[in-house]
Image (spheres, rainbow, N blue to C red):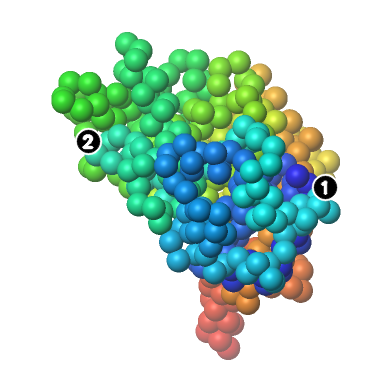
Amino acid sequence: MKSLKLTALGQIPEADITFGDLTVFVGEQASGKSILLQLVKLVLDAGDITRTLKKHGFDWHGKTEHFLSLYFGEGMAKIWDTAATKITVDSEIFTLDKVLSKKRKEKAESLFLIPAHRAMTLKDGWPRAFTDYAIGDPYVVKQFSEHLRLLLEMRSSYSEDIIFPQAGRMNKTIRDVIEKNIFGEAQVKLDRSGLRKRIILDVEGNQLPFMVWSTGQREFVPLLMGLYQLLPSGGRKKNNLNWVVIEEPELGLHPQSISVLLLMLFELLRRGYKVIVSTHSSQVPELIWAIQLLAKWNADPMHLLKLLDLNVTPFSTELTQIVFEEKAFKTYYLSPHNEVKNISTLDAEDSDEAVSDWGGLTLFSTKVADVLSEAMWRAEL
C-alpha cells in the first residue's frame, strides 16, 4: 500500500494520504487519528481480522453494523456510512463487502498495531486473553493483548525468567539506552513463585508488582514486549509482518525517555518495516525536521548520533546512515475542522500555521516566545 484516500469516515470528511517509510499523524484528541489507524489495519489485514474474530467466538451474522461494532468498538458502527463512505487504496476501491465476503483471499497478518490503551492489556501483571475483553472493546486492543499473552505463555515454558534486559534481544546499544532511561538498575522478570504467573520489576531483590510501577514503566513494558515480537534475533523482520503502527508511543514518558522510542523507530525502519506513528509529542516531528534539514545541507549523518546521545559504534553508525540516506518521511495533521493536511515540510517559515506550528505541537512555545518578546519590548520603552 502506497496511498490511501477516504471520504466520510467518522469525523474525517476527506483525506488523501501518501505513506512514507515513517508516517506521522498529529492532531488534537478526537480528531480521528485512532479511526484512521484502525482503518489502515482493516485495509491490510481484513482476512486475518475476520478469521481471528470467528476463532474467538465472535459473529456479526452477516450484518455490516455488527462487524463495525466488533472491530472499531461499541457505538462506532455509524462512523461508516455505506452510501457516503468511500475508501480507495492505491487506486483500488475497498469495500466492506469484500471484507465480509466468504470468497476473500485469506492472508496472514501483515500489520502489527500497538494501541494507545496498551497498559490496560496487563491485568495484575499478566496480559489478558482476547476473550477476557467485552464484546464492545476495540479489536486492536484485544488482538494486541492476545499477542502479548501468547508471547509470555511461550516464554514461561523456558527456564529463563528475565524479560529485560536479555542478551540477544535487540542490539546492546538499544538495550543500554532503555536500561539507562526507563528501568535504571531494575530488571523486568517473570515471577512464578505465587499461584499465578505475573510480570514484576526486580529492584535490588525487591519484587514490585505491576500497579506500583511508575506510569511510564507501565506504559513502556507492553510496548517493549510488542517490539519483541517485531525484532527477532538476527536483525531481520518478523515473518509476514511489513507494517508497524504505534499509537502515542510517548505516553507516560519523560522527554529524555522519548528519545529511546525514536531510536527504536530507527531500528524498525532499518529492518525494513513501514512505520506509522500517532503522537502528541513534538519530539517525533522535531527529529524528522532535523533529518530533513541535515539532508538538505548535505551534512554528515553522524550528527544524528549526537541528537540521540549515542556512542559511535558500527551498529549506531549503520542505523543512522540508513535512516538518513534511504528513508522517506511524511507528516499529516488532523485539524479541529476535520481536515487532514499534509505538513511534511515542517517549515517553520511557512505562512500556513498548521505547517509552521507542526499541527499545533509547537503552538504554545511559539506563543510564549511572542508574549515574552512583547513584554520585553514594552519594558524597554
The amino acid type, in three-letter code, at marker 2 is Pro
Tell me which residue sits at (63%, 24%) in the image. Answer: 239
Q: Quadrant of residue 186?
A: top left
372 lies above or below 3:
below
Q: Percent position (x, y) of residue 190?
A: 29, 24
Badge 1 is on which residue?
296
Mark 1 falls on what kind of element? helix
The amino acid type, in three-letter code, at marker 1 is Lys
Residue 209: assigned label: 2
Tell which residue pokes out farthest to the left in this image.
Answer: 194
Quarter occupied by the N terminus: top right
Left or right of 284 on screen, residue 142: left
Tell me which residue sits at (32%, 43%) in the image. Answer: 132
Identify the mark nearer the N-term, 2 or 1: 2
Q: Percent position (x, y) of residue 84?
A: 69, 71
Left or right of 61 on screen, residue 277: right
Mark 2 falls on what kind of element? loop
